[in-house]
Image: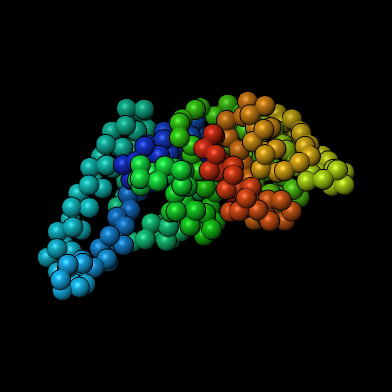
């Protein structure tokens, strides 16, 4: 069961929703909660452009001043987040890191069991329809489960997990079973056959997954669907009134072929509900 949760704080609306989910899960799982603010070092690397003299570099004084200002902003955001967590009844550990956000998250993920990130970050106002690049880049490097949160918070009352028989989907299934049992919520197990010819295999995969869930005393329903995987995942999650989708991030079949591609991009970028990606 998850006992350590880490989430990013950047002052964006998406980051606030990620914090809501992190606090919600930490309270229900009795987990340690850490908030991290990452000062993007790329903001200190770009040169200044002079209209007549061409490109010039930052002066040391200007770099130090900007770095101090960015740190001060991060400290303020973390204090506000800690106060919000304390009001909810949970102690929050905070940290400031410097570097490229996706790389920093990849480097520090070893100190947690779950990373929670907003679907869109601090640049969402200027590009509201683009999924956050930090989130996408981190997912490619993540070896810890990563929860990508939507545009609005909703308590988790039912979970859907997609299975395809791959090792990664098996890890996602076990994560979903453990989370469903810990939260005391029902689980829906979904297998998708892209064609009628794949239906028997999908049904067998679903049956095996359901047997694992029952062996762990998990209240689970089994569903098999035929069609475009991304569409079926969203349709079935909505039809079953699920509040969280769990997928394996590396596998075979539809999850492997399309994750961080058409299926995952569609499911994650839809922003309709949180998606937990498990390697």
Residue shown at the point (64%, 47%) measured from the top left = 263
Total labels: the figure holds 0
Q: Position of residue 222 (x, y in %)?
A: 76, 33
The correct choice, above or below, for 114 with respect to 53 in the image is above
Q: Position of residue 116 (x, y in %)?
A: 46, 44
Q: Quadrant of residue 85?
A: top left
Left-right relation of 69 to 256: left
Residue shown at the point (67%, 33%) measured from the top left = 235
Q: Position of residue 185 (x, y in %)?
A: 61, 27
Left-right relation of 127 to 236: left
Residue shown at the point (72%, 31%) measured from the top left = 220
Residue shown at the point (21%, 67%) measured from the top left = 49
Q: Quadrant of residue 244?
A: top right
Say whether residue 211 is visible. no
The correct choice, above or below, for 134 with respect to 10 in the image is below
Q: Residue furthest left?
A: 61
Quarter of the rendering occupied by the C terminus: bottom right
The correct choice, above or below, for 191 with respect to 110 in the image is above
């Amino acid at each position: 069961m998850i006992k350590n949760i880490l989430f990013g704080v950047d002052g964006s609306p998406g980051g606030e929703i990620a914090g809501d989910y992190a606090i919600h899960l930490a309270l229900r799982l009795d987990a340690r909660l850490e908030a991290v603010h990452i000062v993007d070092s790329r903001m200190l690397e770009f040169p200044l452009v002079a209209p007549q003299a061409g490109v010039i570099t930052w002066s040391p004084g200007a770099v130090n001043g900007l770095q101090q200002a960015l740190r001060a902003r991060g400290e303020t955001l973390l204090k506000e987040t800690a106060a919000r967590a304390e009001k909810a009844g949970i102690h929050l550990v905070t940290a400031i890191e410097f570097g490229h956000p996706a790389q920093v998250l990849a480097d520090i993920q070893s100190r947690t069991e779950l990373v929670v990130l907003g679907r869109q970050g601090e640049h969402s106002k200027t590009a509201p329809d683009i999924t956050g690049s930090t989130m996408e880049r981190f997912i490619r490097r993540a070896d810890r489960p990563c929860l990508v949160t939507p545009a609005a918070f909703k308590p988790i009352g039912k979970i859907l997990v997609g299975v395809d028989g791959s090792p990664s989907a098996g890890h996602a299934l076990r994560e979903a079973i453990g989370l469903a049992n810990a939260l005391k919520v029902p689980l829906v197990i979904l297998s998708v056959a892209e064609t009628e010819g794949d239906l028997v295999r999908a049904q067998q995969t679903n049956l095996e997954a359901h047997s694992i869930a029952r062996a762990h005393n998990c209240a689970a329903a089994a569903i098999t669907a035929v069609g475009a995987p991304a569409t079926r995942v969203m349709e079935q999650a909505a039809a079953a009134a699920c509040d969280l989708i769990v997928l394996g991030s590396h596998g075979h079949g539809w999850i492997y072929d399309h994750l961080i591609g058409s299926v995952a991009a569609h499911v994650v970028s839809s922003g309709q509900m949180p998606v937990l990606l498990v390697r």
